[in-house]
Image (cartoon, rainbow, N blue to C red):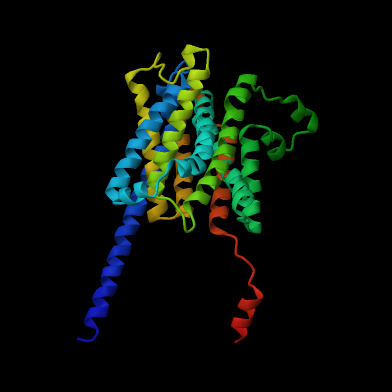
Amino acid sequence: FFFTKPRTIEKEKNETKNRMKSEAFLYMGLLAVQYGIQPILTKEFTSSDVERKSVVLVQEVVKFAMAGSMLLMSGGGKAAIQSWSVTSWISVALVPAGLYCIQNLSALLACQNLDAVTYNVLNQTKTLSAALCCYLVMGRKQSKMQIVALLLLLLSALVLEKIVNLDFLLSASSEEDASEKTVEVSSKHLTHGVAPVLLASFLSGLAGALSQKNLQGSNSRNSYFFTMELCMATTIMLVITSLTSSDSSSSPTNFEHWTPTTIIPILTNAAGGILVGLVTKHAGSVKKGFALIFGLLISGILQATLKSDDGLQKEHIIGGILASISLYLHGTNPYVAPPTTADAKKKKE
């Protein structure tokens, strides 16, 4: 009789943990699929002639609607609105929104000019930029193993872009033979593909660090409401840039070259943003990294299967493996602050 209640409580806790674990794996699987197919869908259904501002505008509207729905479902809408003011919105959301706006435009440009695996692996440098920006903005330090992982991540990008010659590293060929093997890389590939995705990666880290600073602490904001604030700021910025531009074709309301299927990658990208929050809630940020790694694998499989002329190369495979290892090392070796003098005294006592 005395042990009935504790055992029942323990059983309920175990059932809750198992249910949450199942939900976590479900969300991780969905996020991996979304992350893997997003570049392919964007390249397939978004014409290179589409005005990028119009894509960003619709994406922000969809994201606003999704975040608003989640806010109402969570029951935090009333409290978020009561504490809102125009002044706080400007100070908290305007700068990150501007950074995210430029990031979205850069990422879209890169996605249209890079294959899925190259885009995904280069996009992983956002972990490097996030670590750097979190240290600069919030003073968050990295462990020695995490620094090694970040350097490994940089190496993966260099291998993927054939800046590091794998033939020279893996074979016993002479330097003369290696020097004769030049890699043909078009200037458009670098200026419209590599550079934009690296810029988007850095801006993602900077905006993420600023957002994290605003979302944490005693005056933290509701995450869904903060997303809506960012959407409002981004939309206003797009309208302002269109009014100041003399080119009417660059207006965010220019839907020329749109097709009914253009909305597909917009919807999946917005859904991916919701899945990131669900994975972080139910599984944590480390497990989110694993989901993104499987996203790389899905991109590679789909690319090799659907496009025989654009199949996997050894640079993609080795670069993807290095990026996966670096993400794993970074997620499993967090920084641990050294014990203070007070902690040492407590241990002695």
Q: Seen in the image, is 30 located left or right of residue 312?
A: left
Residue 307 visible, this orientation: no
Residue placed at 42% from the left, 34% from the top?
232
Q: Is residue 185 left or right of residue 327?
A: right
Q: Which residue does the image show at 64% across and 49% down from the upper left?
A: 136
Q: What percent of the width, then of the height, locates residue 203?
A: 57, 37
Question: Based on the displayed image, in which of its 4 quarters is residue 257 positioned?
Answer: top left
Residue 48 location in percent, x, y? 48, 18
Residue 334 sits above or below residue 196 on the image: below
For the residue pair 93 and 189, the one nearer the viewer reads as: 93
Residue 213 position in % (x across, y down): 53, 51
Q: Which picture quadrant has residue 99?
A: top right
- Relative to 339, is 190 above or below? above
The correct choice, above or below, for 33 with respect to 10 in the image is above
Residue placed most toward the observer, 45 or 179: 45
Task: Work out whether residue 245 can be spotted.
Answer: yes
User: Which percent across, then down, holds residue 123?
Assistant: 54, 37
Q: Quadrant of residue 146?
A: bottom right
For the point 64% across and 73% down, which residue is it?
340
Is residue 243 placed above or below 28 in the rendered structure? Answer: above
In the image, farthest residue toward the left:
1
**Quadrant the N terminus occupies:** bottom left
Would you say 272 lies left or right of 128 here?
A: left
